[in-house]
Structures are given as structure tokens and as C-alpha cells.
Image (tube, rainbow, N blue to C red):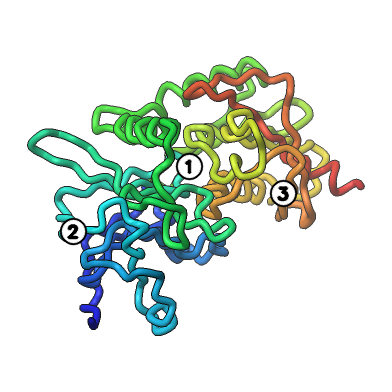
């Protein structure tokens, strides 16, 4: 049987503008994709690429995975014995589908909604660990672990994560967002630490795009201090792939101290530092990666590597039950090593 041309059922860009969620079918099978978008600013793209998860067959599947069709470039159908329900299924209607993006922006769930009963059914999930060791995603109609999808997790943790993500995105409304209260808590903590009298200016560094972020500048007798405001609104991607307790590291702010001696020797140093810290404030979600203690970055103001060092004394507020950590960009010490 020849496949029909691929037809788009649903297309949606993530809140961070880095991934497209796509649902397509070719008359034989339905797939859910997350596809990395080109960076409009020309920055180096991340390594996310394209990730795909089988959703359902529209025709009766083969007895075994048809590798010959795959070699010809056809999207594969799930073998019939690996389907929970191997009967023929209809193409889902676009108006009944929703994509719930994970809070980190590097995963999503495909939800089918029955508008009459308001019943929500998870059809497929592409989690952050999709692409690791030939795992692609979870599907409700998948009965066994296969090369195309795995069954939905039996525990409730994944569904709770999806529900929590939906609640987070729904908190951004025309009337307001959680950023306003977080912003005030962070500013109060910084003022207490660095002196409200030393606060010189607040800059918006989000370019008018989600997520909202700012930068505070303090001038003390010995240094200029720059600290971000609002990075911690969103969980950093990929932390859970590397540490056992991601909640301790996934919400951070960045800061840098530039000594009077350094700024006096370079009149453009402060402006360059502001541009650089603003760029790194968007790095995790643009690159689907994370910044943590001990990580090094290319710090353009000094033209060298800089190490990120966690401030263990400054007490910032928590957000969504996660502590917020301040990471200092230790540029001057790295330059002296």
C-alpha cells in the first residue's frame, strides 16, 4: 500500500521559541515531532535536532517492523502486536489536540481533549530524555517497549509533571504573571545584600520576548555588580539528565563583579559585560542545556574562560518549591590563574 503525502494536523511553537511541536500523518500512521528551530539571531543552535514519537496506526500494522520501508524513507508503522488496540483508528482532529510543553521547554506531551465531557487523554509524550539510547517517547497505544515508542509510564509522576506544567503556563495571563512577584522578591534580596542605595539601574534584557528577564546594576566603592532578575522563573533544561537532585540546581540567577581597577583600565568593560551576561541569561533555553557550579563559559569581556561559582551565603527566594541559587561569573580570578 502506498503512503499518502504527509499531512499536518497540528503545529505549535514552544513558549521559548526554540522548538516546533508537529503532529503529522500519511494515511497510514500518526507521529508527534519536536523539531529544533533555527536561531533567528544567528547564535549557535543546540543539539536537540528532531525527535519523533509514534502516536497511532491508521491502518493495520505489519507483523514486524518493516525495515525495508524505513530504508525507503517511509515513516514506520507500529507492529500490530505492539499496539494496545490494533484496530483501525481515525486521524485525530486538530481542534481536539493540545500540546503541553514541559516547564524546561525541552519536552512536551500531546493531549486529546473531548470538549463535551472535558476529558483529557495523553496520547504521546516526548520527554527530555528522548534520543538517549534509542528511546524516543511514550505513547498511550503502545503495548511494549519498541524502537518507535514505549508504553506510558505506569506511575503517576509523569502525568503529575504534565499537569504541573499546564498549570505553570496557564499562570501567564493578560492580568499578570508569576514574574512580577518573583521579580520583587529578587530585587529585595539583592538590595539587602548589595545596598539599596547602591542600586543604579534596572534593565530589561528579554527583548520583549518570553520569558521576562531583567538586569540590576549596583555601584559600590570597590566594584560594579551586575545580577540577573528572572532567570529562575523557568527551570533549566537537562539538569535531571546529570544529577540526582535537579531541584537544587535548576533555578539560577547570574552575577558578576567587576573591580574598579578593571573598569578604569577598560572603559567599555561594563557595557561588554552587560551584553555578555544578558546572552548567557538566555543560554539554557536556547541551547537546551544548563549552567551550574563549576561550569565554565567563554567570557568575552576578559577574552578567556570564566568559572561559575555558587554563592552559598546570599539567600534568594525559592520558586515553585525550588531554591534559587546565584552563580557568580568568576572572570577576574580565572584570568589570573
Residue labelled with disc 2: 89
Q: Position of residue 89 (x, y in %)?
A: 18, 58
In the image: residue 261, left or right of residue 132 = right
> Image quadrant for the N terminus?
bottom left
| Point 33% across, 43% down: residue | 100
Q: CA distance from mark 1 to mark 3?
A: 37 Å
Tag nearer the camera, 3 or 2: 2
Which circle's residue, 2 or 1, is located before the other in the chain?
2
Q: Secondary structure at mark 3?
A: loop
Which circle's residue, 3 or 2, is located before the other in the chain?
2
Residue labelled with disc 3: 267
Mark 2 is surrounded, within 10 Å at the Cα level, by few (under 14), some (14 to 19) or many (20 or more) other residues, namely: some
Q: Position of residue 45 (x, y in %)?
A: 54, 63
| Point 78% across, 36% down: residue | 260
Q: CA distance from mark 3 to mark 2?
A: 67 Å
In the image: residue 299, left or right of residue 274 = right
Mark 3 is surrounded, within 10 Å at the Cα level, by few (under 14), some (14 to 19) or many (20 or more) other residues, namely: few
CB-based contact (under 8 Å), mark 2 and mark 1:
no
- Name the foreground residue: 191 vs 293: 293
Mark 1 is surrounded, within 10 Å at the Cα level, by few (under 14), some (14 to 19) or many (20 or more) other residues, namely: many
Q: Which residue of the protein is positioned furthest toward the left in this rendering?
A: 116
In the image: residue 6, left or right of residue 262 = left
Residue labelled with disc 1: 104
Tag nearer the camera, 2 or 1: 2
Q: Secondary structure at mark 1?
A: loop
Tag nearer the camera, 1 or 3: 1
Q: Secondary structure at mark 2?
A: loop
Amino acid at each position: 500500500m502506498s503512503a499518502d503525502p504527509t499531512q499536518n494536523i497540528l503545529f505549535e511553537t514552544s513558549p521559548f521559541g526554540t522548538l516546533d511541536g508537529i503532529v503529522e500523518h500519511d494515511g497510514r500512521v500518526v507521529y508527534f515531532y519536536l523539531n529544533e528551530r533555527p536561531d533567528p539571531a544567528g547564535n549557535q543552535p543546540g543539539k536537540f535536532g528532531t525527535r519523533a514519537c509514534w502516536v497511532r496506526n491508521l491502518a493495520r500494522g505489519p507483523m514486524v517492523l518493516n525495515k525495508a520501508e524505513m530504508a525507503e524513507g517511509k515513516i514506520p508503522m507500529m507492529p500490530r502486536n505492539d499496539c494496545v488496540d490494533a484496530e483501525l483508528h481515525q486521524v485525530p482532529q486538530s481542534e481536539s489536540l493540545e500540546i503541553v510543553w514541559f516547564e524546561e521547554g525541552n519536552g512536551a506531551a500531546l493531549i486529546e481533549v473531548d470538549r463535551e465531557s472535558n476529558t483529557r487523554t495523553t496520547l504521546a509524550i516526548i520527554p527530555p530524555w528522548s534520543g538517549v539510547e534509542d528511546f524516543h517517547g511514550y505513547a498511550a497505544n503502545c503495548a511494549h517497549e519498541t524502537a518507535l515508542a514505549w508504553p506510558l509510564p505506569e506511575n503517576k509522576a509523569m502525568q503529575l509533571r504534565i499537569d504541573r506544567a499546564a498549570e505553570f503556563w496557564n499562570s501567564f495571563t493578560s492580568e499578570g504573571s508569576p514574574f512580577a512577584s518573583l521579580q520583587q522578591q529578587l530585587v529585595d534580596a539583592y538590595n539587602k545584600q548589595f545596598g539599596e542605595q547602591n542600586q543604579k539601574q534596572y534593565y530589561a534584557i528579554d527583548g520583549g520576548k518570553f520569558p521576562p528577564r531583567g538586569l540590576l546594576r549596583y555601584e559600590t566603592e570597590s566594584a560594579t555588580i551586575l545580577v540577573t532578575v528572572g532567570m529562575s522563573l523557568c527551570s533549566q533544561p537537562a539538569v535531571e539528565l546529570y544529577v540526582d537532585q535537579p531541584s537544587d540546581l535548576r533555578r539560577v540567577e547570574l552575577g558578576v563583579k567587576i573591580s574598579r581597577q578593571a573598569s578604569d583600565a577598560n572603559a567599555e568593560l561594563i557595557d561588554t559585560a552587560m551584553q555578555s551576561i544578558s546572552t548567557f541569561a538566555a543560554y539554557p533555553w536556547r541551547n537546551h542545556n544548563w549552567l551550574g557550579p563549576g561550569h565554565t563559559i567563554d567570557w568575552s569581556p576578559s577574552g578567556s574562560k570564566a568559572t561559575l561559582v555558587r554563592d552559598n551565603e546570599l539567600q534568594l527566594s525559592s520558586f515553585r518549591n525550588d531554591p534559587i541559587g546565584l552563580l557568580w561569573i568568576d572572570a577576574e580570578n580565572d584570568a589570573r590563574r
